[in-house]
Image (cartoon, rainbow, N blue to C red):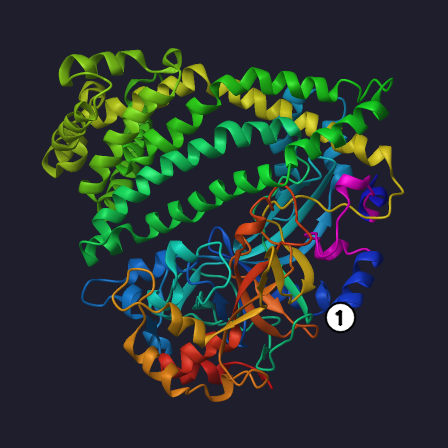
Amino acid sequence: MKKFFIALIFCFSLFKASADEGMWLPMLLGQQVYDNMVKHGLKLTKEQLYSINKPSIKDAVIIFGGGCTGEIVSNRGLIFTNHHCGYGVIAGASTVEHNYLKDGFYAYTKDQEIKSGLTVTFLLRIEDVTDQVEKELKGLNYEERAKKTPEVYKQITDKVADSANSIIGKVYSMFKGNQYIMYVYQIYKDIRLVGAPPESVGKFGGDTDNWEWPRHTGDYSIFRVYATKTGKPATYSVDNVPLKPKYFLPVSLKGYSDGSYAMIYGYPGSTNRYETSYGIKLKNEIDNPSLVHLRDIRLKDMYAEMIKDPAVKLKLAENYSSVANYYKFYDGETKQLKKYHVYENKQAAEAKFAAWAKGKPEYENVLSDYEKNYAAWTPYAKERVYTIEGILGSSLAGYASSLMAVERALVQQGKTQADVNKALDAANEQRKTFLTEEDQPSDRKIMAATAMMFYTDVDKSQQPTDFYNNLKQKFGPLDDDATYKKWANYVFDSTMILDSAKWAAFVAHPDAVTLQNDPAYAYASAFVQNYLLKYSKLYSDFVAKNNELGRLYLKGIMEMDPVAAKKMYPDANFSMRVSYGNVKSYNPRDAVHYDYETTEKGILEKYIPGDYEFDLPAKEIELLKKRDFGQYIDKKRNDLVTDFITTNDITGGNSGSPVMDANGNLIGLAFDGNYEALSHKIQFDKDLNRTICVDIRYVLWCVDKLGGAKNIINELKLVR
């Protein structure tokens, strides 16, 4: 079993990895994949890419925070990642008086670096644990398998856990449960902000340019990891020192050309390249349109308040950025899936599988069972999306729903006063964070709009009837938006959550009736309970059954053609991967050609003074007009290059990933994909897929010339 999967398996035409496609496990680079990397231009050995005995590139690549990638770029623990990955820390450290988000920030000495509360995670090693997992799960049905899998994972990871050194293990399911790999990690907890450009640089182009090429965004931020004097992980302390890493990436000033080798390491979040036609249909018809519709409302209401007041912009910045990023993605994904007939392509692949599976008991009912499983869940899919993205899209409702833990502590048998106190303490801490981020004017509108959208868009039989009946009796017709506005104002004006005196009284003498009668809590809990009581079990059954069918489907595909020419690769699941390709221009449509890099000329062409998305610092305009590019100039173009594109296969989670040349030198930071290939989570497009990267020379120019932080430049190992 183990040797079979480490060699990895081959597949028939629709599941072959095309040129530049693939998110490969660095430990399991087969000879064919490595040879293809060399053919693309790689100059490094396998051991330089991944080794547990010697320093290698994998030692410089980190999980940054909870959902991004970063890289170590100096022997003093300096980290480069994206601006949007450090956005929450930058915004959180900012005030109206010291607005680092707006003006940028650089620490010119170590004592100016800002505590962040983030963690970074280093990969120590990778182990195949397929045999261990399968031994424990053998013979179980899908429900039993789903229940026991976490227990099996824990048994395996407990053997490597070392709390004294912050070492943990995490088991990842690969190929939908046909292979299991454990990653062993070490977590560092003292991470400090070192530098960030002004938001107008780090987010230049805003939502207009998001997922678009050409791009001119300086999407970077700089942090540092600290440790004890012996190099061990530790929480923040003034006694901690910069970490001396096992390996750090040299930084190249050489540039690249159209066709140059490009390699990306990182932690891609999720793909579903082996999705079925049934999943595509649900995504296209219900999930994505619902998400886009609901997020559109939230974004408009937040934006209307953010442009009025810098303080509100700071307060809402992180939430708005998060919502906006995937609003555009979900819309583009559906359009691309339809444009390239992905649904029909999946059906064709399934027809081939069905013909092969006929007469094979293990596989012949897989597709018909898929169809039944989706048919059972699809009628309720919109209710789930509207609850999570709509009702709980209101910040007040989202926080109020968390108080269900307090209610349980108050009413459930067997709960003690200690349980109540614990729940209240947690609620108090969460409330402090909520209040610092809450903007009532926009949230009132969001709550009113999403409550009405749930009523108009979701099947009436799936709604919390008592809530809407009471709303109608007290506030007016349910098809009138004025009704919902009056009701939302009542909720905000009456809830104890927003009234510190009432809240303090409740905490001092907590009782379930007071909580249940609170209008914000009554609203949120009505919808959450409606979902939990009626649809949660349906969804968990749907997911568990789908997982088991996915495992069988892929297992069958691999058996169907085990000697096909191209290797499969596992879906992204936020485990370290390496992808390779080339810097490359492309033609998105007839008579249109996109070059492979952009320059400062495009920045000046896009610049709009005072604009929310295309403004720039006056100092940058001055420096660009003087053409003061220093050592960061691209000699080929005699200009300052800002961004470039590659053919690498990445997805969310790769934000901040290092883009390296053939010798492993850093040439840029990956930060986005292109609109023409937004179906990439489901299907890679070998012709149109591009990864958008900020050129490392533009990053250094901003740090040096714009920020005056020569101290940071001096820390780097520059390759000229």
- What amino acid is labelled 1 in the image? Gly
| Left or right placement of residue 214 versus residue 603 in this view | right
> Whole-percent x and y of residue 126?
69, 53
Residue at image point 70% right, 20% down? 141
**Residue reaching furthest to the front:** 591
> Whole-percent x and y of residue 73?
54, 73
Circle 1: element type: loop
| Left or right placement of residue 257 versus residue 32 in this view | left
- Is 313 inside the magenta-drawn segment? no
> Whole-percent x and y of residue 363?
79, 22
Q: From what the image shows, is residue 202 above or below residue 624?
A: above
Q: Nearer the viewer, residue 597 or 12?
A: 597
**Residue reaching furthest to the left:** 501
Name the magenta segment's main secondary structure: loop
Regarding residue 610, the answer to whether it shows in the image is yes
In the image, the segment drawn in magenta is: 7-30
Q: Quadrant of residue 241?
A: bottom left
Q: Which of 124 and 686 is in front in this view?
A: 686
Q: Name the residue under label 1.
A: 41
Locate the N terminus and report the quarter of the image it occupies.
top right
- Is 28 inside the magenta-drawn segment? yes
Q: From what the image shows, is residue 207 above or below residue 557?
A: below
Residue at image point 70% right, 52% down? 22
Q: From what the image shows, is residue 340 above or below residue 672?
A: above
The crowd level at tag 1 (other Cα within 10 Å; few <14, some 14-19, many 20+) is many
Q: From what the image shows, is residue 30 above or below residue 220?
A: above
> Whole-percent x and y of residue 349?
75, 32
Q: In which quarter of the image is residue 201?
A: bottom left
Residue at image point 62% right, 18% down? 373
